[in-house]
Image (spheres, rainbow, N blue to C red):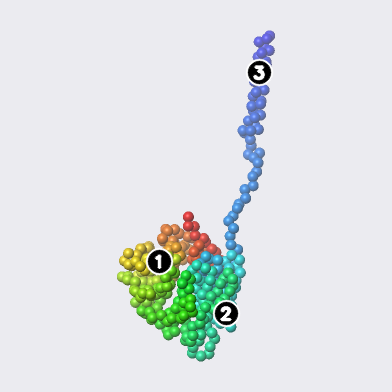
Amino acid sequence: MKVFKRIIIWIIISLTIQSLGLLYLDKKIFVSSNNFKAVKVEDKKKATDKVINIPQNVEYKNSFDGKYLSYLKDGILNIIDTKTGESKSVKTENESKILNYIWLSDRNRILFVDKESSEGKKSNFFLNYYDAGKNEVGKVEKLDSLDQGAVIDSIDASTLHNVTYIKVNEKGVKGVVYRIDINHKITKMNLNSSIIGSIKVIPHVDRLIYEDDLNGNIYATNPNIRLSFNNKTKLLYIDSNDIVYVGIVEGGKISKVMYGGLDTDTGSWKTVLFDKPVDKENIFVSQKGDVMINDKLQGIVKDVTMSKEYKYEGTYLGVYDLGIASTSQGKLIKTPFNKE
C-alpha cells in the first residue's frame, strides 16, 4: 500500500513538472511571430536640394562650389541659386549689354565685360564684378575706344595678385590681350602671336599662359618662353598649385594630357593617357588636379586620375569642385562626387 501511494505521488509530481515546462516553452520559446512587438522603422532619406526648373537651350556656367548656376542671354546675365531656385538678373549701368564673363575659381564672384552704347565706330568697354552672395555690382576699369564690333573672347584673373587679363578680338581672328592690375593700370600685352587661342593665369605668380592657334604652340610671359612639345597642343587648365595642363592634339582631338610646373622641363612632365582621343570641350581639370572626361553618350564623367566614374542623369551642364550639374526634363540635377 505504501509503495502504491509513492508511485501515485511521483506520477503527480512528474505531470506537474511537464505541464510547467510546456507552459514555459509555449510562452517564452515557441512564441508565434504574431506576438512580436512591432517596431516602426523610419526611412531617413538624405535631404536634397529643392526641385529647380531651369531654362533650356542656353549655355550654363557653374560657380566654383556649384552654389550658383549662370547663363548669358541677349546681353543679360542671369544667376540661379541652386539651393533655393531664386533667379536674379545682374543690373548694369544704363542697362548695357554684357558681352562675356567668368566665375572666379575660389569664390562666388563674377568678372564681366559690358559695352557702352555708341553710334560711332568706337565704344567704351567696362570690366565689372558681381558678388553673388551680396547681389552687388561694382566697376573695376574702363577700356577706352575699342572697335564697336570688338568681341570679348575670354577673361581670366588671379585673385591673389588682383590682376585680370582680357582677350579682345577687334579685327577678325586677330586677338589682343589687355592686362589690368590692382593699380588700375591697363597694359596692351606684346605677345608672340596675334592668332591667340585660350588664355590662363598662374594663380600664385603673375604670368599669362596662352595658345598660338596658328601653330599649335603654347607660350608663357614674364619671362617669355615657349613650352616645348613634339605635337600641336591645347591649353586646358592651371590648377590651384600652379600646375599647367596641356592637351596633346592628334587628328583634331586630344589623345593625352601632360602636366607640370613652369619651372620644370616639359620632358619630365607627367602624362595622363586616354583610351581614345577626346574633344577638348569634354575635358575638365579640377582645382586639385583631377583630369576628367565627360562621356555624353553614356552619361558618365570619368575621373581618369583617380580611376573613378560618376553616372549623371539627363544632359550634362558642367562640372564644379564638388560634383556634376545636369538637367533632365527642365529640372536641375546635382550629382556629388564621392571622393572616399
Q: Which residue is mark 3?
A: 11
- Relative to 6, say whether 16 is above or below: below
Q: 79 or 190: which is nearer to us?
A: 190
Q: Which residue is mark 1?
A: 243
Three-letter amino acid code at disc 2? Thr
| Residue located at (32% from left, 71% from top) | 228
Tell me the CA gap for discs 2 and 3. Answer: 104 Å
- Relative to 292, say whether 223 is above or below: below
> Disc 1 on helix, strand or loop?
loop
Three-letter amino acid code at disc 3? Ile
Tell me the CA gap for discs 1 and 3. Answer: 94 Å
Q: Which residue is mark 2?
A: 92
Three-letter amino acid code at disc 1? Ile
Which residue extends farthest top? Answer: 1
| Residue located at (42% from left, 58% from top) | 307
- How many numbered marks have been drawn onto this rendered protein structure? 3
Q: Position of residue 221 (x, y in %)?
A: 38, 75
Name the N-terminal-most of marks 2 and 3. Answer: 3
Q: Are marks 1 and 3 in contact (CB under 8 Å)?
A: no
Pointer 1: residues within 10 angstroms few (<14), some, or many (20+)? some
Left or right of 158? Residue 221 is: left
Q: Position of residue 282 (x, y in %)?
A: 44, 68
Which residue extends farthest front? Answer: 183
Q: Nearer the viewer, mark 1 or mark 3?
A: 1
Name the N-terminal-most of marks 1 and 2. Answer: 2
